[in-house]
Amino acid sequence: MTASIDLYYWPTPNGWKVSIALEEMGLPYQTQLINIGKGDQFDPDFLKIAPNNRMPAITDPDGPDGAPISIFESGAILQYLARKTGTFCGADERARVAVDQWLMWQMGGLGPMAGQAHHFLKYAPSMEPPQELPYAQDRYRNETRRLYQVLNKQLSENEFVAGSDYSIADMAIWPWASLWEGQQQTLDDKPHLARWLETVGSRPAVQQGQGLHADLRDAKQDDDEKRESQKVLFGQK
């Protein structure tokens, strides 16, 4: 049996990308929780694995040529796991290019823009003092809307994002797109996106991956805990 991969994780959309992939690929893994609200991402041992102090990251004891390897950045992890298993990355070079370009679209577009929309629409107004910034809210809400329009058009012509086959591109995009309501978006004019969200969200491995330690995401914090978490998450220099 393949040795267990260590998944350094917290239940966020970026974390879900990798937990979903591990479930879809049937790879054994152990979860190492990185509580980003308490600053675990700055621990020196974690920084040896993820020098950009961001999760997710993985350590695979059965890496290339049987030697251990550590990998940070969710897109790089997904590509590595797809190559390792020979799955979900395209059956030929043309298909692989399609998967890679939509994976990069998520990494450089939807993830950062939807993340900023979440920040300025949800978190910033609840900070002390409140940061209600209409320009930033409109900027990121509108850019996220544009990206979802691009995605809806792509899905009007394809069953999955990169074509007829489910791939790591879907695994990367779905976690962020599933939170469309928190980004103040609508699906009323995006029927193909709505269809895809339901199709991917009904996959058992997706549900298992998104459900990994979901209780920690929903945990209630008192005001002092919220302020301390905000300092850690948004006060980095």
Image: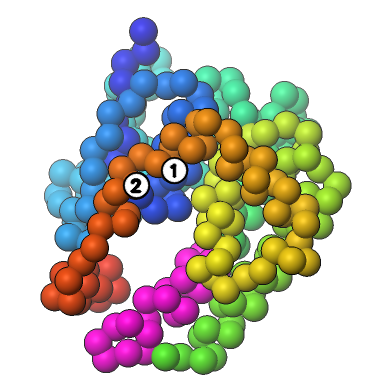
Residue 141 position within the rendered picture, expressed as x and y whole percent measured from the top left:
59, 77
Q: Which stretch did the figure color magenta?
A: 112-131
Residue occupied by mark 2: 214
Please tell me which residue lies in front, 226 or 116: 226
Q: Which mark is residue 169?
A: none
Please tell me which residue lies in front, 178 or 9: 178
Q: Is residue 147 magenta?
A: no
158 with respect to 100 (left or right)? right
Residue at the spot 29% in from the left edge and 48% down from the top edge? 215
- Determine the main secondary structure of the stretch shown in magenta: helix
Residue occupied by mark 1: 210
Q: Is residue 211 above or below residue 35?
A: above
Image quarter of the N terminus: top left
Q: Is residue 130 magenta?
A: yes
Circle 2 sits in a helix, a strand or a loop, which is it?
helix
The amino acid type found where label 1 is placed reads Gln
Residue at the spot 51% in from the left edge and 37% down from the top edge? 206
Residue 163 position within the rendered picture, expressed as x and y whole percent measured from the top left:
77, 38
Q: Residue furthest right?
A: 157
Q: Residue furthest top?
A: 1
